[in-house]
Image (cartoon, rainbow, N blue to C red):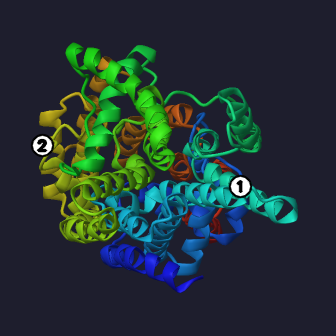
C-alpha cells in the first residue's frame, strides 16, 4: 500500500478504534441473552454445522421463522469458544469490522473522486457518527456490520475490475462475487449489491457516446452475476426455512406499509444528518394524512434527484444510492419487528450520507474560495465536526453497557417502549433486586395495562416471593385467558403455580398446553419431566428430557436433570 494511501486511512481508522474502544468492557444486552447466552448451539464448537444450517431460533421453537443468519450464528459459535463465554471477543469483532468498513469507505470514495482529502473526510465522519453507535456497540448488530463491510468490499473490487480483461479481471470479479455472497449470508439487505452494481455501471463513464439502451444493457450484464448469487441464496434459504417466511407483524398489511414508508425514510435521513433523540426502541406512530400526502411525492422524487445528480456527478449519485437502496427493504413495516424504526438500519446509509455531506461542503468551499483550497478546507471542517460527533458517540456507547443502562435510557424518553420494562425488570430479578423488579413491572402495566408479558412476569415474581398463593396466581392467569389467548409463557407459569402447590395433574395439563403452543422450547420439556419424576413416571421423565436434548443438544439443565434421575434410581432399594 502506498504511503499516501496509508495516511488517507490512518486518521479515520484510528478515530473508529478510539471512539469505540470503550465498548470492549460492555457485556451482553437485550437480544444477546437469548441469541448467545441461552443458546446451547452457540456454546459448543461441535454445534457449528448446526448453527449455520438452521434458522436462528430453531434451537427453541418449531415455528416458521424468517430469521436465517448463518454467518452471524457461526461467528457467535466461534467467538464463544475463543473467549470462553466472555463478551469481549464479540465486542472486539464489532469494533474491528467498523474500522475495516471505515477504511473501505475511504478507498471507495478515493477511487471515484481521486481526492484523498475528501475520502479521508467522509470516512472520518462515518467513523465517529453517533447513529452508528447501536450497530457497533450492540453485539446483536453483527449482521449489519458484516453485510456492510462485505458490500463495500464488493463495490470496491468490482470497480477495480472494470476494464480489466483476461485472468486478472476474472479474479477480481470472482472476489467481488464472493464478497457479495458474504454480504447476503450476513443479512438479506446484502441484496442491495445487485441494484448498486447496476446503477454504478449505468452512471459511471463507459464507452464513448454510448446511448441509453446500450448502457442499460451493459449495466444489466454487469449486474447479472450478482443476481445469480442472490438466486443461489434464495434456493438455500428455501431449503433451510422451508418456504416463504411469515410476516413479522401479521396484523399489518400493504396499506400500513404505504402509510409509514415516507415517514420512515425521511426519519432515517433526519437521523443521518441530525443525529438527535437516539433510542434503542422507537415507537412506531401512524403519520397524519397530511404527512402521508406530502411524504409520497417527496419519496418518489428521490430516484429522480439521483438521476439528475448522475448527469453532473456520477460519484455522488452512487453515494446517494448507498443511502437510499439499503433503506428500501426497511420501509416495509409488515416484515419488520415491533421496533420498526431501528438506528442500526442506517449504518451503511450513513457511509453514503457522510460522503454526500463532505462533497456538498467541498462544492461550497470551491465556490467561496479557490478550488484548490476546497479539499483542505473540507478536511479541516470534517475534523472540527468530528469532535462533537465523537463525544456524542462515546456518551451514547455507555448506554449499551448493560440492560439497566439500556432500558433506563429508553424509558426516560419513551415510556411506550414496553419491551424495555420487561428487560429492566428481568435485569433487576437477575440482580436479586426483587422489589425494584416489581416496581418496574407495575410502572410498565400502568402504561400498558393489557400487556400479557409484563403481567405474567409480575405474577411469576410474586409467586416466587411468596406474595401470592398458587391458587391466586392460577386464577389470575385464567382471567387473562378470558380476554385473549394465553401465550406459552403464561401456560408455563400456570404449570409452575400448580407444581408449587404439588397439583401434578393440573401442572402436567398446563405444561402440555405450553408445549402445544411452542413445541420447540427445551425448557418446557424439563418442567414436564419434573412432573413425571415427582409422580414416579421415570421413563416418561427420561423421554421428556431426551426430547429437550434433541431440540437443544448440550442443554445443561436437561443434563443436570438426567443426572438427578440417575441418582434417584440408584438410591432406590
Residue 167 or residue 396, whichever sits in front: 167
Q: Secondary structure at mark 1?
A: loop
Q: Residues within 10 Å of mark 1 (few under 14, many from 20)?
A: some
Q: Secondary structure at mark 2?
A: helix
Residue at 41%, 36% (x, y): give it: 337
Please name which of the two marks, 2 or 1, marks the residue nearer to the observer. Answer: 1
Residue 281 or residue 357, whichever sits in front: 357
| Residue 458 in the image, given as x and y percentages of width and height | 23, 44
Which quadrant of the figure has residue 293? top left
Residue 449 or residue 372, whichever sits in front: 372
Task: State the quadrant of the C terminus.
Answer: bottom right
| Residue 81 in the image, given as x and y percentages of width and height | 59, 76
Task: State the quadrant of the N terminus.
Answer: bottom right
If you read the primary sequence from the N terminus, does the residue marked by circle 2 or circle 1 appear first?
1
Residue 372 or residue 389, whichever sits in front: 372
Residue 425 visible in the snapshot? yes
| Residue 333 in the image, given as x and y percentages of width and height | 41, 28
Residue at 34%, 76% (x, y): give it: 15
Residue at 41%, 32% (x, y): give it: 305
Residue 509 position (above or below residue 179): above
Tell me, for residue 151, which label it has, or none.
none
Q: Residues within 10 Å of mark 2 (few under 14, many from 20)?
A: some
| Residue 471 in the image, given as x and y percentages of width and height | 27, 36
Image-based side of 94 in relation to 27, left or right: right
Image-based side of 398 in relation to 238, left or right: left
Image-based side of 573 in relation to 391, left or right: right
Residue 401 position (above or below residue 445): below
Reading the image, the residue beneath label 2 is: 443
Image-based side of 26 in relation to 185, left or right: left
How many angstroms separate mark 2 from mark 1 (CA)? 60 Å
Reading the image, the residue beneath label 1 is: 162
Amino acid at each position: 500500500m502506498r504511503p499516501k494511501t496509508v495516511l488517507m486511512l490512518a486518521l479515520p481508522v484510528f478515530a473508529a478504534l478510539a471512539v469505540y474502544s470503550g465498548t470492549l468492557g460492555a457485556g451482553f444486552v437485550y437480544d444477546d441473552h437469548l441469541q448467545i447466552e441461552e443458546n446451547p448451539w452457540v456454546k459448543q464448537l461441535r454445534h457449528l454445522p448446526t448453527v449455520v444450517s438452521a434458522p436462528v431460533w430453531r434451537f427453541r421453537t418449531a415455528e416458521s421463522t424468517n430469521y436465517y443468519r448463518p454467518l452471524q450464528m457461526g461467528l457467535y459459535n466461534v467467538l464463544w469458544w475463543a473467549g470462553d463465554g466472555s463478551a469481549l471477543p464479540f465486542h472486539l469483532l464489532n469494533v474491528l469490522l467498523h474500522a475495516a468498513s471505515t477504511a473501505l469507505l475511504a478507498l471507495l470514495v478515493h477511487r471515484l473522486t481521486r481526492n484523498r482529502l475528501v475520502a479521508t473526510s467522509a470516512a472520518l465522519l462515518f467513523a465517529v457518527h453517533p447513529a452508528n453507535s447501536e450497530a457497533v456497540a450492540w453485539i446483536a448488530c453483527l449482521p449489519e456490520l458484516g453485510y456492510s463491510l462485505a458490500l463495500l468490499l464488493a463495490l470496491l473490487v468490482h470497480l477495480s475490475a472494470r476494464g480489466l480483461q483476461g485472468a486478472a479481471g476474472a479474479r477480481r470479479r470472482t472476489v467481488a462475487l464472493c464478497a457479495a455472497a458474504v454480504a447476503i449470508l450476513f443479512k438479506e439487505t446484502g441484496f442491495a449489491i445487485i441494484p448498486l452494481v447496476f446503477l454504478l455501471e449505468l452512471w459511471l463513464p463507459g464507452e464513448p457516446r454510448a446511448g441509453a439502451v446500450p448502457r442499460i444493457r451493459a449495466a444489466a450484464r454487469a449486474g447479472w452475476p450478482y443476481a445469480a448469487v442472490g438466486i443461489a441464496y434464495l434456493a438455500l434459504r428455501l431449503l433451510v426455512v422451508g418456504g416463504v417466511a411469515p410476516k413479522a407483524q401479521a396484523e399489518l398489511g400493504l396499506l400500513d406499509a404505504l402509510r409509514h414508508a415516507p415517514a420512515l425514510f425521511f426519519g432515517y435521513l433526519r437521523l443521518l444528518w441530525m443525529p438527535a433523540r437516539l433510542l434503542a426502541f422507537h415507537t412506531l406512530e401512524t403519520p397524519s394524512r397530511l404527512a402521508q400526502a406530502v411524504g409520497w411525492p417527496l419519496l418518489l422524487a428521490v430516484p429522480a434527484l439521483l438521476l439528475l445528480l448522475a448527469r453532473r456527478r456520477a460519484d455522488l449519485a452512487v453515494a446517494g444510492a448507498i443511502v437510499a437502496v439499503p433503506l428500501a427493504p426497511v420501509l416495509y413495516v409488515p416484515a419488520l419487528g415491533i421496533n420498526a424504526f431501528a438506528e442500526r438500519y442506517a449504518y451503511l446509509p450513513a457511509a453514503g450520507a457522510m460522503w454526500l455531506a463532505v462533497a456538498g461542503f467541498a462544492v461550497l468551499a470551491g465556490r467561496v474560495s479557490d478550488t484548490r483550497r476546497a479539499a483542505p478546507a473540507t478536511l479541516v471542517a470534517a475534523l472540527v465536526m468530528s469532535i462533537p460527533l465523537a463525544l456524542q458517540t462515546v456518551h451514547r456507547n455507555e448506554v449499551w453497557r448493560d440492560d439497566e443502562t439500556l432500558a433506563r435510557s429508553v424509558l426516560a424518553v419513551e415510556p411506550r417502549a414496553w419491551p424495555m420494562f420487561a428487560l429492566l425488570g428481568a435485569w433487576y430479578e437477575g440482580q436479586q433486586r426483587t422489589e425494584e423488579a416489581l416496581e418496574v413491572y407495575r410502572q410498565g402495566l400502568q402504561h400498558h395495562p393489557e400487556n400479557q408479558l409484563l403481567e405474567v412476569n409480575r405474577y411469576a415474581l410474586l409467586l416466587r416471593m411468596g406474595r401470592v398463593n398458587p391458587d391466586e396466581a392460577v386464577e389470575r392467569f385464567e382471567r387473562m385467558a378470558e380476554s385473549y389467548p394465553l401465550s406459552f409463557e403464561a401456560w408455563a407459569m400456570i404449570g409452575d403455580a400448580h407444581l408449587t402447590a404439588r397439583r401434578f395433574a393440573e401442572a402436567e395439563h398446563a405444561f402440555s398446553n405450553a408445549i402445544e403452543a411452542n413445541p420447540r422450547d427445551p425448557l418446557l420439556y424439563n418442567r414436564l419431566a419434573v412432573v413425571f419424576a415427582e409422580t414416579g413416571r421415570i421413563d416418561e421423565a427420561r423421554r421428556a428430557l431426551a426430547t429437550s436434548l434433541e431440540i437443544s443438544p448440550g442443554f445443561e439443565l436437561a443434563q443436570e436433570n438426567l443426572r438427578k434421575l440417575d441418582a434417584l434410581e440408584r438410591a432406590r432399594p
